[in-house]
Image: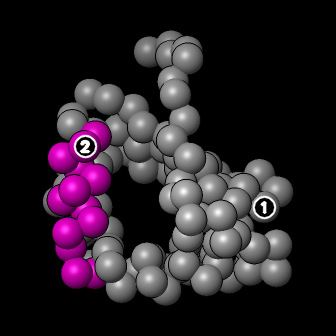
Amino acid sequence: MTRVAWTARLRPDRIDDYITAHTAVWPDVLAAITAAGIRDYSIFLLGDRVIGTYACDDPDESLLLEAAAEVTVRWRAAMRGLFDDDLRHNGVTWLPQIFRLD
């Protein structure tokens, strides 16, 4: 199992919209995430920054499978306007794991 973490900055005026969207994530999005082998997924908020963490067996394969789902394309399009413009140019920032206690 591999743990993965990412971060991205939200538009300050859209933070509440992001939170609201994540209180009712589309069921098909949840199914696509699960089908991609992603589990134990959490998203945290720090100011205008979101930090996502999850576990999977093969991070590259999981990302490809999730991105290939049609519902993922629609969800990401719906979320795109909530993020800072940097996301459009650079994508999320992947965070290296430097410590873990099981």
Identified by mark 1, the residue type is Asp
Q: Tell me the SS state at disc 2.
A: helix
Instruction: Tell me the residue that label 1 is attached to.
Output: 48
Quadrant containing the N terminus in the rendered view: top left
Above or below residue 14? Residue 44 is above
Above or below residue 83? Residue 45 is above
Q: Which residue is at a point 49% across and 86% down the rendered structure image?
A: 78
User: For mark 2, does the 10 Å Cα neighbourhood hold few (<14), some (14 to 19), or many (20 or more) residues?
Assistant: few
Left or right of residue 24, residue 84 in this image: right
Instruction: Tell me the residue that label 2 is attached to.
Output: 60
Query: How many numbered marks have been drawn onto this rendered protein structure?
Result: 2
Q: Tell me the SS state at disc 1.
A: loop
Separation of disc 2 and disc 1 at Cα? 27 Å
Identified by mark 2, the residue type is Asp
Please identify the quarter of the rendering in which residue 35 is found: bottom left
Q: In the drawing, what numbered circle is on residue 91?
A: none
Residue 55 in the image: x percent, y percent?
35, 38
Magenta-colored span:
59-71
Q: Is residue 64 magenta?
A: yes
Please identify the quarter of the rendering in which residue 75 is found: bottom left
Q: Which residue is at a point 28% across and 53% down the rendered structure image?
A: 63
Above or below residue 35? Residue 78 is below
Residue 79 in the image: x percent, y percent?
53, 79
Left or right of residue 71, residue 86 in this image: right
Would you say the magenta stretch is mainly helix, strand or loop?
helix
Residue 51 in the image: x percent, y percent?
61, 49
Left or right of residue 59, residue 44 in this image: right
Residue 27, can we see it?
A: no
Which callout, 2 or 1, points to the residue nearer the camera?
2
Quadrant containing the C terminus in the rendered view: top left
Compare residues 28 and 77 and report the one nearer the observer. Answer: 77
